[in-house]
Image (tube, coloured by chain):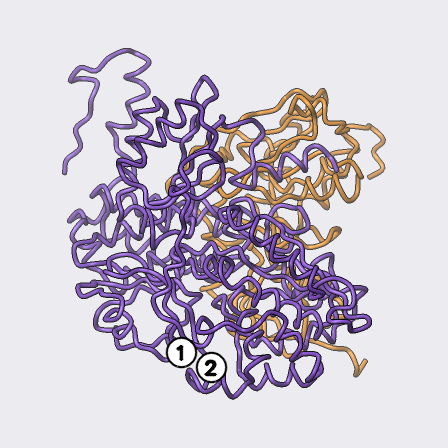
Chain colours: A orange, B purple
């Protein structure tokens, strides 16, 4: 055990293995670093920047940063939390997030991470973008108003499902999700409700049809404990899937 | 490749489209220097004569007129691209004639040759530009000295990357050489997209052999057999001559198999065109683009020297860096070190434009003061100099004593002069819009923060901003600097932050003297309702207090 390498996170010693990122090691040690585009089951991406930490005075993205012994990582200072809060506010004003009406509310990772950063209002002027809903698929509905462009569905469809149903198209503020289908619609994309890509969205942008608002307020994922305790919404999505399939063994 | 990926790539690059833009695709260069030379009025006049709106193809499919980011002709602007080919020195007469040619359906290839004359415009020569080295002489020096000795010489010269970041060239080459890989690659970054920079244009036009020589000795040192020249789409007109230079070199045994008859010294160079994406000047985005993908900067580490093109060890250097390396190979490290400062050896090419009597290319030893440069280019009433492009430093007169050097005012080469009569807010708006347009959209702070910044700046511009809004811009800017994924995002707030701190009066004179002012115009917000109801009477308007 004396050879176990560690770095410091908020003063605590965090052990790590070769190849670990700061995020990997922290999560394994039970330390929560807020994140949205990162899902520990898949390779890191680094686009949402919410997992930014201060390492020896430099701001770095913890999900892509290889762990190193001489690191002194700040994950909780007021300055850092303020940066994260601003990033969350940016994501909220960039799309159209009407939490009170959204069926993901209470189980939504975006919302839960916002609370984690102490965000109480979107603060900035809303962009109010015109984004479409795609309800063409018989089992799945896409609310692009809620998309935060984390690319998880894109990556998982390509790398896990082997389908490449989605792509991030465009550039800058015109970046958007498109479907791999001649009509441009989800229904022609080959996507199936059983695809892993359907269950990794950290917001309410991709939802199964036919079971709207099934979980009452008070029983939703983050209703009683924060995300730092509960963890990512995608880790719990199987519960919902079993509901669909009716096999109840998840 | 899935269909969806091809589409996503097309929509990433400004010069790629899913449908034809018309027989004539006209793009006005829209850098602040083009604006200062009156491009807006010329664009409006062309649109009026052709009966088109900017960005919308004409119904008959004949023409589309649009704007594009800086095309690197700031010293002989205003400029435009006609079907991708640069046209310089626009004026009313030239616009009038172009409109005539378009309406008559005369192909761009048959337009008057003088429209396409691009001058080198070299105003001052020093170590890099003065005197030519004979073709093959740097490669011969490599053959005589050997790879290790030549790398040692480049090390001793102190040469640092000329793109702006200033990483030591010999260190980069050594790291690449020592990195394990199936193949090694040499890439020349000729994606000269920083607004106000055009020195690579001149090197590519008149010093291409020296550039290729520099790439070839780099290949010899790191053990690469394949090289790429990533040429920005705006410089398409340079490509035929560059291809000819490459062929001449192959014919002369300076490229290809067994270069200069040395067994196993194989290297060739391929030209890869960019397609209108500033972010591809960032080396890892450039490599993504080279691989045929969207130009999204990679997560680093690993760095390109170990995991670059096709995940193999890759050197990416600026055009000027390769040119300098070739000349160091011929003339030696002492010759190079004799110019410049301790930390910034050698000389630097500056692209000077804006309010000065003699814009063009100036080569100076590092350590030259901004004041001396202004005197030489004939800028006697400058209120500010923007050094290193849109992301650079805004230098006020009281700081004209400062020097061009990595340790003082570093620069990739852009040097834009703003006279006393200019409104610096126009510069800031131009750059901030540019960064929004060029953001790759990958990370939150750049994609969203850039737009927030732009919107607040527009609020300043229309006279609705308060001092609170200025503080907001500073705060958003800091988040962008700290949290952005790449250098573009981290430096995108610079024009605002630089001018807020050095030219506060530019903002102060436009502020509303109140602590709070709505971010939107109430009356304008009613426009949709007025349109729907067909009303425009007094009661359909709201007057806001000023």
Residue B400 appearing in the image: yes
Residue A121 appearing in the image: no
| Residue behind mark 2 | B345
Mark 2 and mark 1 residues within 8 Å of each other at the beta carbon: yes
Is residue B76 depicted above or below A200 in this figure? below
| Nearer the observer, B352 or B493 | B352
**Chain letter, disc 2 residue:** B
- Point out the image quarter for the C terminus of chain B: top left
Horizontal and vertical percent position of residue B270:
67, 54
Q: Is residue A23 left or right of residue A41?
A: left
Q: Where on the picture, by quarter, is residue B97?
A: top left
Horizontal and vertical percent position of residue A186:
68, 25
**Chain letter, disc 1 residue:** B
Horizontal and vertical percent position of residue B90:
32, 42
Q: Is residue B249 left or right of residue A99?
A: right
Horizontal and vertical percent position of residue B411:
41, 68
Query: Residue at the spot x=75%, y=41% of the render?
Result: A158
Label of residue B366 in the image: 1
- Point out the image quarter for the N terminus of chain B: top right
Query: Residue at the spot x=24%, y=45% of the render?
Result: B461
Is residue B100 depicted above or below A72 in this figure? above
Q: Secondary structure at mark 2?
A: loop
Q: Is residue B359 left or right of residue A149?
A: left
Query: Residue at the spot x=40%, y=31% of the render?
Result: B65
């Amino acid at each position: 055990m004396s050879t176990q390498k560690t770095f410091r996170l908020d003063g605590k010693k965090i052990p790590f293995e070769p190849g670990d990122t700061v995020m990997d090691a922290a999560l394994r040690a039970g330390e929560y670093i807020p994140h949205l585009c990162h899902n520990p089951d898949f390779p890191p991406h680094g686009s949402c920047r919410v997992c930014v930490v201060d390492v020896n005075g430099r701001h770095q993205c913890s999900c892509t940063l290889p762990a190193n012994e001489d690191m002194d990582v700040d994950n909780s200072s007021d300055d850092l939390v303020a940066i994260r809060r601003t990033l969350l506010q940016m994501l909220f004003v960039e799309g159209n997030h009407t939490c009170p009406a959204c069926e993901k509310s209470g189980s939504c990772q975006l919302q839960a991470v916002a609370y984690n950063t102490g965000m109480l209002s979107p603060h900035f002027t809303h962009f109010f973008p015109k984004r479409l809903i795609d309800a063409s698929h018989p089992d799945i509905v896409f609310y692009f108003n809620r998309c935060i462009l984390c690319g998880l569905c894109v990556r998982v469809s390509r790398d896990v499902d082997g389908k490449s149903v989605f792509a991030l198209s465009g550039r800058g503020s015109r970046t958007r999700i498109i479907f791999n289908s001649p009509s441009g619609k989800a229904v022609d994309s080959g996507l199936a409700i059983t695809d892993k890509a359907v269950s990794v969205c950290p917001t309410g942008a991709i939802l199964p049809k036919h079971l709207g608002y099934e979980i009452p307020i008070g029983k939703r994922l983050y209703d009683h404990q924060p995300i730092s305790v509960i963890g990512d919404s995608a880790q719990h999505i199987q519960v919902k899937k079993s509901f669909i399939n009716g096999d109840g063994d998840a | 490749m899935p269909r969806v990926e091809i589409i996503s790539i097309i929509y990433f690059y400004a010069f790629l489209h899913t449908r034809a833009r018309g027989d004539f695709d006209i793009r006005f260069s829209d850098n602040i220097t083009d604006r200062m030379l009156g491009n807006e009025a010329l664009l409006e006049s062309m649109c009026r004569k052709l009966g088109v709106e900017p960005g919308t193809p004409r119904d008959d499919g004949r023409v589309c007129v649009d704007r594009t980011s800086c095309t690197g002709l700031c010293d002989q602007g205003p400029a435009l691209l006609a079907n991708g080919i640069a046209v310089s020195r626009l004026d009313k007469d030239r616009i009038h004639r172009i409109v005539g040619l378009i309406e008559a359906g005369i192909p761009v290839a048959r337009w008057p040759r003088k429209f396409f004359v691009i001058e080198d415009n070299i105003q001052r020569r020093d170590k890099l530009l003065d005197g030519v080295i004979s073709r093959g002489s740097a490669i011969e020096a490599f053959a005589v000295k050997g790879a290790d000795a030549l790398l040692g010489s480049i090390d001793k010269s102190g040469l640092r990357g000329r793109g702006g970041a200033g990483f030591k060239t010999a260190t980069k080459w050594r790291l690449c050489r020592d990195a394990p890989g199936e193949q090694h690659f040499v890439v020349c970054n000729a994606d000269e997209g920083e607004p106000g920079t055009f020195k690579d244009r001149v090197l590519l036009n008149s010093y291409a052999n020296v550039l290729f020589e520099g790439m070839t000795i780099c290949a010899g040192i790191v053990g690469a057999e394949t090289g790429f020249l990533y040429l920005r789409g705006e410089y398409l007109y340079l490509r035929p001559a560059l291809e000819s230079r490459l062929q001449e070199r192959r014919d002369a045994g300076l490229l290809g198999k067994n270069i200069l008859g040395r067994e196993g010294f194989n290297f060739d160079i391929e030209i890869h065109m960019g397609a209108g994406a500033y972010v591809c000047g960032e080396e890892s985005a450039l490599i993504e683009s080279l691989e045929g993908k969207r130009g999204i900067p990679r997560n680093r580490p690993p760095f390109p020297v170990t995991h670059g093109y096709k995940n193999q060890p890759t050197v990416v250097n600026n055009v000027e860096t390769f040119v300098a390396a070739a000349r160091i190979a011929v003339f030696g490290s002492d010759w190079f070190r004799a110019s410049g400062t301790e930390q910034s050896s050698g000389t630097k090419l500056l692209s000077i434009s804006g309010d000065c009597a003699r814009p063009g290319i100036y080569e100076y030893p590092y350590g030259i003061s901004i004041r001396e440069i202004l005197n030489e280019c004939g800028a006697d009433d400058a209120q500010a100099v923007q050094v290193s492009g849109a992301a650079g430093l805004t230098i006020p007169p009281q700081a004209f004593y400062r020097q061009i050097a990595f340790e003082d005012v570093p620069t990739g080469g852009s040097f834009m002069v703003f006279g006393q009569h200019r409104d610096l807010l126009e510069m800031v708006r131009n750059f901030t819009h540019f960064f929004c347009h060029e953001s790759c959209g990958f990370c939150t702070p750049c994609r969203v923060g850039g737009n927030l910044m732009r919107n607040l700046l527009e609020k300043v511009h229309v006279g609705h901003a308060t001092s609170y809004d200025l503080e907001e811009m500073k705060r958003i800017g800091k988040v962008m600097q700290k949290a952005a994924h790449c250098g573009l995002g981290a430096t995108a707030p610079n024009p605002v932050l630089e001018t807020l701190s050095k030219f506060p009066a530019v903002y102060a004179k436009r502020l509303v003297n109140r602590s709070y002012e709505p971010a939107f115009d109430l009356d304008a917000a009613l426009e949709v309702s007025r349109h729907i109801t067909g009303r425009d009477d007094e009661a359909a308007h709201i007057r806001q207090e000023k």
